[in-house]
Image: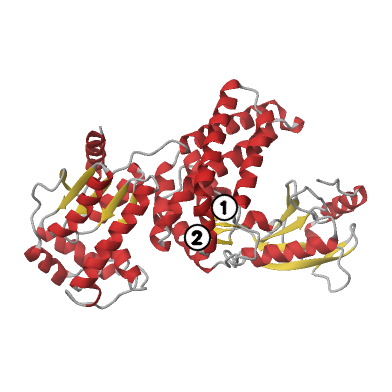
């Protein structure tokens, strides 16, 4: 139960904030001090720095009513956020003196504590970039890599911890429906809520073993907890997530796919399904957690419902005003509609790329991810993952040696088949980005599609030998791609490739942007 804050504590802090509006209180030149207030904190922007002070409030999910608690959670905020943004989170500053005459950085008795942060331009926030149409693929790719690496290093819940069990996942999901239902006035919205609730409860019951298995395998970790576009900034050419949840461990210790789902949902809500797909593809390619797709839809729906509930609560607050109320109601309806969309099954299909090195397979498959919502499996990445190597690592293997010997190649295609089966079972369409130059390699996937009664398509990428050579040389010189193919490998491919015959529908094309639509049309026709 939420407890009201002490009137005396609130009054003392109000006096403190008023005094800290004075630039002379700061050890560095600051000019005018900007004050931003939220329901749980005060933020004072002074020169190159920002100071965050927690309010002495208790709201059920947090309790900052004592000075000791505020100090503890300031230190937790610093610890948690320095995992992702050490450049932004500098120190916890003790404030001494009195509320009327505070002293920052005191060594005497503290009356309050603040988290000191490096200040950045608000225009650098990902949500601002999205609103202005300035969010780009490079921002998404960088963020996918940051979050994948962060999750890889994050602390993992143990069997003794209370986090991440099927029951722990179900409770907040049910609370969303219970708390949102009385806030909806329109029959259409109540109907959507009932459909979403029915789907969620049924899915959760079916996936209890999956939730428990993921917890046992270490996928419940100490995450960010509040990963949406408004909590990511582009600073000095890098993606910096900030403002982790420090005040409630249950909201932070979650399945990594719940965290991924928040960002995917937020991008989709903003009409950027292409970036949502790109982020998800980049994250999965880096982590290999394709099994997580089995629970992603559940978390996508959950995250959308949380936002719908928050918007509905905001719409009912008197201080929102008429314009604010209408905006919040529209936000609630939009998130309800998005949650309902996430419950709808996708049209599954299996697509394989075919072509020599430099023919544009990765270019095309990336666009099938963004525009077609496909999950991509790359042979260059999975071949190295099987050997414990990062995608960008160089193995130094020669033609048909090391990673590229026949045995390793067969193991790679077996792994691609296994992963494709896993992703398809989770309800997603798949594109396999591999050369597939030999008949047995193509047959692996044709048989899988036939077994699952799914549309199967071969995308044949072609380019002149001169263009192929130029692309391979340029890619080798850049050294950023997972592929290690050089001119010698290309020559060997040209000599040994087995031509396509009647192995399935084939789309022959040059690797340009215009023909992506024709590939997607061919998929729709084959699924009809």
Which residue is at 86% across, 53% downward? 13
**Which x, y percent locates residue 338?**
50, 35
Q: Nearer the viewer, residue 400 or 174?
A: 174
Which residue is at 62% across, 63% downward? 81
For disc 1, the marked residue is 227
The answer, for residue 97, to whether it is visible in the render is yes
Label 2 to label 1: alpha-carbon separation:
10 Å
For disc 2, the marked residue is 147
The answer, for residue 33, to whether it is visible in the render is no
Q: Quick check: 406 above or below 25?
A: below
**Which x, y percent locates residue 400?**
17, 74
Q: Is residue 93 left or right of residue 109?
A: left
Q: Who comes first in sequence, dot 2 or dot 1?
A: 2
**Which x, y percent locates residue 441?**
18, 59
Q: Quick check: 11 above or below 70?
A: above
Question: CB under 8 Å between callouts 2 and 1?
Answer: yes
Q: Is residue 2 left or right of residue 507?
A: right
Q: Tell me the element at label 2.
A: helix
Q: What is the quadrant of residue 309 in the picture?
A: top right
Q: Quick check: 78 above or below 168?
A: below
């Amino acid at each position: 139960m939420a407890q009201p804050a002490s009137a005396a504590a609130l009054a003392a802090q109000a006096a403190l904030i008023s005094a800290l509006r004075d630039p002379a209180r700061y050890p560095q030149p600051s000019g005018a001090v900007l004050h931003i207030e939220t329901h749980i904190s005060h933020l004072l922007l002074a020169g190159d720095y920002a100071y965050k002070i927690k309010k002495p409030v208790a709201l059920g999910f947090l309790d900052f009513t004592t000075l000791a608690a505020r100090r503890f959670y300031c230190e937790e905020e610093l610890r948690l956020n320095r995992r992702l943004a050490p450049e932004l989170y500098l120190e916890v500053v003790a404030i001494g003196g009195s509320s009327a005459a505070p002293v920052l950085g005191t060594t005497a008795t503290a009356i309050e504590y603040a988290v000191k942060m490096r200040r950045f331009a608000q225009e650098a926030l990902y949500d601002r970039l999205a609103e202005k149409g300035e969010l780009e693929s490079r921002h998404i790719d960088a963020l996918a890599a940051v979050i994948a690496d962060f999750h890889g290093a994050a602390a993992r819940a143990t069997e003794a911890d209370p986090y991440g069990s099927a029951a722990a996942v179900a409770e907040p999901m049910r609370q969303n429906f219970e708390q949102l239902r009385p806030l909806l006035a329109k029959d259409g919205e109540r109907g959507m809520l009932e459909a979403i609730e029915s789907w969620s409860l049924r899915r959760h019951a079916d996936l209890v073993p999956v939730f428990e298995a993921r917890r046992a395998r270490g996928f419940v970790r100490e995450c960010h907890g509040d990963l949406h576009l408004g909590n990511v900034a582009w600073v000095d050419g890098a993606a910096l997530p900030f403002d982790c949840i420090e005040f409630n461990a249950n909201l932070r210790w979650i399945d990594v796919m719940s965290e991924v789902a928040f960002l995917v949902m937020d991008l989709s809500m903003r009409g950027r399904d292409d970036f949502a797909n790109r982020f998800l593809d980049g994250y999965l390619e880096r982590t290999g957690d394709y099994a997580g797709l089995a629970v992603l839809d559940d978390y996508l729906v959950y995250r959308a419902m949380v936002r719908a509930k928050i918007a509905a609560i905001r719409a009912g607050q008197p201080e929102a005003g008429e314009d604010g109320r209408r905006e919040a109601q529209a936000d609630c309806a939009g998130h309800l509609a998005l949650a309902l969309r996430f419950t709808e099954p996708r049209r599954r299909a299996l697509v394989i790329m075919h072509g020599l090195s430099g023919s544009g397979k990765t270019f095309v498959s990336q666009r099938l991810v963004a525009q077609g919502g496909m999950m991509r499996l790359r042979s260059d990445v999975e071949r190295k993952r099987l050997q414990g190597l990062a995608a960008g690592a160089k193995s130094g293997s020669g033609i048909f040696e090391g990673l590229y010997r026949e045995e390793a190649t067969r193991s790679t295609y077996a792994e691609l088949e296994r992963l494709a089966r896993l992703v398809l079972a989770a309800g997603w369409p798949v594109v396999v980005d591999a050369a597939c130059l030999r008949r047995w390699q193509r047959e692996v996937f044709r048989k899988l599609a036939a077994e699952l009664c799914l549309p199967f398509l071969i995308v044949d990428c072609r380019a002149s030998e001169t263009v192929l050579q130029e692309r391979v040389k340029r890619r080798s010189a850049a050294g950023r791609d997972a592929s290690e193919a050089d001119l010698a490998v290309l020559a060997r491919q040209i000599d040994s490739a087995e031509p396509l015959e009647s192995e399935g529908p084939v789309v022959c094309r040059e690797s340009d942007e215009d023909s992506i639509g024709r590939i997607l049309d061919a998929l729709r026709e084959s699924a009809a």
